[in-house]
Image (tube, rainbow, N blue to C red):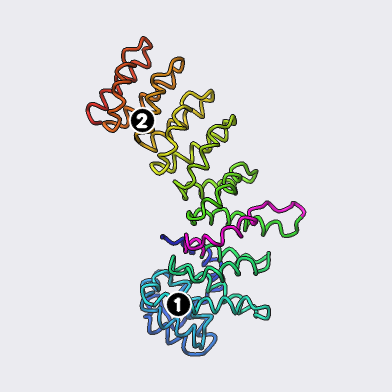
Amino acid sequence: MSCRPFSGVVVFVLCCCIVPSARLEAQGSAKALIAELKSGDSTRCMDAGNATSEHQEHYQKLAAELAVPLFDILEKGPCPGSALTALVNVGPGIVDGIDAGRAIAALVKVVEQGLEPSASPDAASDAGSAVLVIGHFGAAGAPAVPVLRRWIFERPDESFDRSYGLRALESIGDASAPVVPALLPLLAAPAEDDERAWQKNELRHDVVRTLGWIPAAAAVSAPALMAALGDADYGFRNGAIESITKIGAPMVPHLLPALETSDAETKQAVLKILADMGAVAAAAAPAIAPLLGDEDWNVTYQAGEALRQIGPTPAGIAALVKVVGQDGKEDAARTAAEILGGYGSAAKDALPALRKAAASGKWSIADAAKTAIAAIESGG
């Protein structure tokens, strides 16, 4: 499972107060960094943590070497907050240098402490950093899913760092599926007079994108994602499209009913999603082929693009053959023949129907069929 990068978030959180370190240059060693963090001097620790952001690319190359000593400091001091800053900045490379079980246990403890009612602002900030570091571990971070759920729902509504928990769930992937039912209510648009509408709307956008990283929960998230395609918020709607496309094949059965609607705009949107999915949307090809004869030109265009991107499948080819032989749908028949020709030798089963169409009295269909036959027979 690939991990979603945190770089944009890290820059916002950790780079706003960077102070150049007099002790750590861009080419500082791992040993020198750890020595600063172990100094116990708050200024030196802060400078060391900031140096990993200022010279992030360099320290990321040392991630595996830094992992154990940074977690030693996190667990035993003396500067755990600065160690967390460094862990966020050195990135996913730390997973190669430390046992994931030990690391996740330590990070979960920090998050739990930050969620306590009596937690100080510093403890809450450290917990947010720990949530980001959990994301570095990808699927190995699965044991942290319960505390990530708490982070999302127990942080105040106005806290932008709630989204850190969503990013970590994305990295973990399918093991985050148990949390999805609880996330769905967050997709609701806030009331216009809600004084926290801005924060809730931002979280809403984050949640709809997070669903795309958890395909195992598609059966649960699909109705909400499909409903989001009709949302008035353009950004939210695009987030849903992105997630549906990312989930891929499990979403296809949920997309097919939308192809039967009379609304041309909806059909266009769904066909574009299926085209972007490509071959994983093969099951949709038989339902797409008849739309080559739709009354709306935009729909017919998107249907053709979807079939080209999906590529040849036995069921899709059979559906296109029916369109080629359809009376009264000259444009659709011509387009179907062109698509079959584009499939090359994979569409050899369509040759009998194409030969029949080549003898048609309608020039455009006959010409397209002859061209398709040549392409298929040549293996093009």
| Residue range corresponding to the magenta coloring | 169-193
Q: Nearer the viewer, residue 14 or 115?
A: 115
* Secondary structure found at label 2: helix
User: Residue 86: image x %, image y %?
Assistant: 47, 76
Amino acid found under the numbered disc labelled 1: Ala
> In the image, what residue occupies the spot 25% across and 23% down?
374
Q: Is residue 344 left or right of residue 12?
A: left
Quadrant location of the N terminus?
Answer: bottom left
Marker count (numbered):
2
Q: Which badge, 1 or 2, comes first in the chain's sequence?
A: 1
Q: Nearer the viewer, residue 314 or 163?
A: 314
Name the residue furthest bottom: 40
* Secondary structure found at label 1: helix
Q: Nearer the viewer, residue 203 or 90?
A: 203
Q: Which residue is mark 1?
A: 103
The 10 Å Cα crowd at callout 2, few under 14, some 14 to 19, many 20 or more, is: many
Q: Which residue is mark 2?
A: 317
Tell me if residue 79 comes above or below residue 157 in the rendering: below
Q: Is residue 378 magenta?
A: no
